[in-house]
Image (cartoon, grey):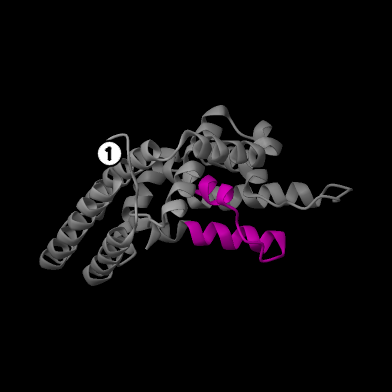
Amino acid sequence: MENYFNYFTEVEEHFQKRRGTGLLLSTLDWALIETWKDAGIPMEAVLRGIDAAFDQYEQRPSKTRKVNSLAYCAQEVLAATEDMKEAAIGAAHEERAGEARGFQPAEIAAFLRRNAAELDAAKLPQGNGISAQRLAQEIALTLRELATDLEKTKLATRLEDLERRLTVMEEKLFAVLLTITSDDEIVAVRAKADRELAPYRRKMPGVQIEQLQKQYVHKRLLERYGLPRLSLFYM
C-alpha cells in the first residue's frame, strides 16, 4: 500500500477535503481509522469508500444534517474493500511500502527515544498489586536498547519485526492501564463511545463496532495518563 506510514494523515485530509471544511477528527474517528489499518484495509479502499459515501450524500435532495464523522463512511469503506477483493493483498502492499517509505535508522531511533522519555516522565498509579510505573520504565529501557541496536545495524532489522515488538509492548501497557483504572472510568468511556457510535451502528458489522470500542478506550487511556503510542505508524 502506497504511503502506508501516512495512512492516518491521508485519510484525515481526504475526509476533510470531501466534507469541505477543516473539521477536526474525533477520538472515535481516529479509533475507526486504526481499526481499518489493523484490519489490513488498503488506504485506497478507505479513500474510495469516503468518496462513495459523499457521492451518495451529495445526491440526496435534502442535506439538513452534515457528515460529521468518518463512521458515516464505514459501510462504503467495507463495500470498497470487498470490491477490490484485497484485504490480504493489501498486507503485501503494506510490507513493500514500509521499505519504500525510506525511514533512516536515526529517524526511527529518535522516535523510540522520544517515546522512552515520555514513558519515564509519566506519573502512573499503582493498583491491584501492579505497578504501571515499573512497566513503563521497563518499556522505556527496551526502547532505548532497540534504538541503539537499530543504529548499529543500520536498519538491517526488518521494520515488520520491530513493529511486532512494539505492538507486544503496547498491548502489555494497555492491559496494565485497564487494570489500574477504576471500573467507573472505563464504564464512562465506553458509554461515551456507545453514544457517539449510536447513529452509525446500522452501517457497521458487530465485529467492527467491538474493535472500534476497544480502540476508543485505548486512546482515551493513553490521553488520561499522557502516554505515547509506540507503533511506527505514529512517527
Give the side of residue 201 with respect to residue 160, left or right. right
Using the rendered image of the protein, determine whether residue 83 is visible from the camera's viewpoint: no
Residue 154, quarter of picture = bottom left
Three-letter residue code for mark 1: Ile
Expressed as whole percent of the image width and height from the top left, the position of residue 204 reads 61, 34
37 or 222, nearer to the observer = 222
Q: Nearer the viewer, residue 220 or 69?
A: 220
Give yes or no for residue 26 being in the magenta stretch.
yes
Q: Residue 142 appears in which quarter of the rendering?
A: bottom left
Residue picked out by circle 1: 130
Q: Could you say where residue 133 lies in the image, as x and y percent from the top left?
A: 28, 50
In this rendering, position of residue 43 left or right of residue 179: right
In-image side of 150 versus 122 (left or right): left
Give how far across and how far down residue 52 sits, in percent: 67, 48
**The furthest residue to the top:** 206
Q: Main secondary structure of the magenta part?
A: helix
Compared with residue 77, is residue 143 higher up or lower down, i.e. above or below?
A: below
Q: Secondary structure at mark 1?
A: strand
Q: Nearer the viewer, residue 50 or 197?
A: 197
Question: Can you give x and y, in whole percent of width and height, for residue 182 in the image?
Answer: 45, 37
Q: Residue furthest left?
A: 152
Which residue sits at x=89%, y=48%?
61
Identify the residue at image location x=41%, y=45%: 90
Q: Quadrant of the C terminus?
A: bottom left
Residue 215 located within the stretch drawn in magenta: no
Work out whether residue 108 or residue 51 is closer to the camera in this orientation and state it.
108
The span shown in magenta is 8-33
